[in-house]
Image: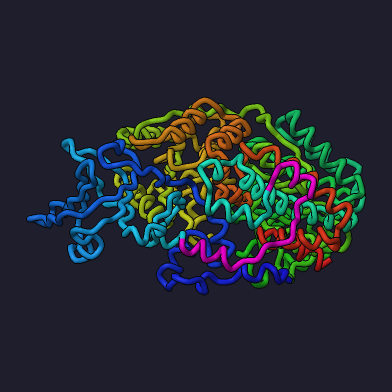
Amino acid sequence: MRPEALFDYFADIERLPGIGKRNKQAIERLAGTRTRDLLMHLPTGLVDRRYRPKVRDAAPGSIATLEVVVDEHLPPHNKRAPYKVRCHDDTAELTLVFFHARADYLRKQLPEGETRIISGKLEHFQGDAQITHPDYMVSPDSADELPLLETVYPLTAGLSGKVLRKAIHAALETVPPLPEWQLKDIVTREGWPDFLSAIKHLHSPSGPETLAPKSPERRRLAADELLATQLALAIVRDRTQKKRGRALKGNGHIRGTLIGNLSYSLTGDQEKALQEIIADLESGRAMLRLMQGDVGSGKTVVALLVMAAAVEAGVQAALLAPTEILANQHLETIAPLAEKAGLRVEKLTGRNKGKHRKEILARLAAGEIDILVGTHAIIQDDVQFRDLGLAIIDEQHRFGVQQRLALAGKATAGIDVLGMTATPIPRTLTLTAYGDMDVSRIQEKPPGRQPVDTRVVSLDRLGEVAQGIGRAVQAGQRAYWVCPLVEESEKLDLAAAEDRYRDFQHMLGPRVGLVHGKMKGADKDAVMEKFQTGEISVLVSTTVIEVGVNVPEATIMVIEHAERFGLAQLHQLRGRVGRGAGKSTCILLRGNEIGEVARARLKTMRESEDGFLIAEEDLKLRGGGEILGTRQSGLPEFKMVDFLEHADLIELARDDARLIVNKDPELKSERGQALRHLLYLFERDEGVRLMQSG
């Protein structure tokens, strides 16, 4: 159960003053529906209104707060002209300018002959001082309504900064202080305030330095968020390993056959990863390991050899993939090799229905299937193994702890878990997201992988590029055309893809296919199959082809509006080509107006194909915000952590979490009870649920 002290933190924001139905919807879009969501929506900057000059001395371009007398209102002669209000102080005149103004409102706010305090950006126009649309216009009696230091927040349509600030300050009044969960020595050494004081200072900062990542307040909250994450992971790891594993020792005969049938030798990195994983299998403690491999580094073959080792030791293995496309891909790679080595492989997805599904389940329960490849369908209650000993989870980050546990629950004795990811993750982040796992990295590319010629081309030349694709297709090549990410809208993503699809249909007729996220699995697979067999030559898509699509004959990748994509995603998409013998090209079409970060991102893509180097660059370019596009890579989202500025806190949190789990695994001590508050507050409470479920 959530601790009582947190009830107010998780209360609905509707109970706060000034939040009506419309405001609530806007705040919900921006931050969330609970008081804690509002409190954790931190300001990104400050407007300083403490500059109080006379009109004559006010610096152009500054935010000035001026005390003036209102002289006269000058309504416009036509609707397009601005409404002006003349004012003065004892040094000079000031004109206030309003577009699309309501005269009655302005006369009420600015009565002629009265004194008003005006705050806003001061400019000079034809030598005269003026402020267009002042931020504040208050009478001297209400001067305290004008904040001298005004916090600036990320906003959304239909929500003003004023309303949001008021809601946040109301929320701060409703929540109690919480017990201290950080170690007293660290709090003292770092000079940290307690959790609630840190939140309060950040929403009412004494200056811009309070909001900087290095301030004690920001460091405190980053340390809290990191500790919550590391502790949850440490608990999961502890529980998994306490469910004692068993030593899975094979005699190597199936592996020998498999390696003998490969048309190439394993790379050094593949060999090393394989040895690390086999050592875990044979150790007798439950394995919890992550295999990170760049696009096309040969993770699937290593996975097959690991599963073969498990089968040699007399148990069954499962390979779980997040999508049907990926599950099919694995099956295509694995099945031909497995059959030659006498391994019995079967696929189970949501598409298996009725009699066929029953038959698969019966064979699985009888132990007549050695390796089961599939999607979430594997986790369903009626799927029973005779003796599941190894689970491999591909694109590990797309499955939550709950799903990992559901799969582990299918084992009668201990189970070894190997995660795989094709998203190269910087070392600091690997620690943060996968603190509970040992990590094997495959960085070398297998021999024969072609380098991809990457070019950045302006969108002005889109027509030329499309004609070039037309010529390449006539010459027998195959191409991907990925449509732009449209901010926050799958509908618009789809519209962009459908338009491009129609353009190519005019040019190439039926040799064009379209895939997008809204399609049914079966329809998507049918189009992919046509692309694989060469029945269609151009595949237009939204980003659904990012991971796991393997068509060695495809040699061209065009990414439209490449500046809108994160580096990790661009790298994943580029990895769809360069898989066969043909020379491959990736064309990044960029908009004409792009920022410095986007420019640097495209430059990195042009200069490097090393996924791990690209991931480190991505971290530098994004700073701590949305790492690697957390939504794309499925890493936990961090609101308080800046991974460059707070790198030292990651190690600190990991070491502390391990110590806690060793000393107080049930979180029963006084500090343990406080840490339960932390886990719930940062929504890392999977760990607590796991403790209770044993």
Q: Nearer the viewer, residue 626 or 62?
A: 62
The colour scheme used to paint the residues is rainbow
Instruction: Choose between 49 and 272: the one closer to the eye.
Output: 49
Q: Which percent across, then down, holds residue 449? A: 61, 29
Point 7% across, 55% down: residue:
77
Please indicate whether residue 142 sits to the left or right of residue 623 in the image. Answer: left
Image mark count: 0
Extreme residue in the left direction: 77
Q: In front: 139, or 672?
A: 139
Residue at image point 65% right, 40% down? 646
Considering every residue shown, the one lying at the far top of the view is: 607
Is there any visible trace of residue 272 in the rendered image?
A: yes
Work out whether residue 517 or residue 173 is closer to the camera in this orientation and state it: 173
Apparent side of residue 686 relative to residue 115 in the rendered image (left or right): right
Horizontal placement of 170 versus 60: left or right?
A: right
- Which contiguous range is marked in magenta? 166-192
> Can residue 328 be seen in the rendering of this structure?
no
Q: In which quadrant of the rendered view does residue 572 lie?
A: top right
Q: Residue at x 79, y 45 (%)?
A: 185
Q: Quadrant of the C terminus?
A: bottom right
Verify whether residue 188 appears in magenta: yes
Q: Is residue 514 above or below residue 600?
A: below
From the top left corner, tell me how far across and down residue 254 is, in percent: 84, 43
> Which picture quadrant has residue 391?
bottom right
Which image quadrant: the N terminus?
bottom right
Q: State the image quarter where residue 488 is shown.
A: bottom left
Where in the figure is residue 305, as x and y percent of width and height? 78, 42
Q: Is residue 441 magenta?
A: no
Residue 29 location in percent, x, y? 47, 62
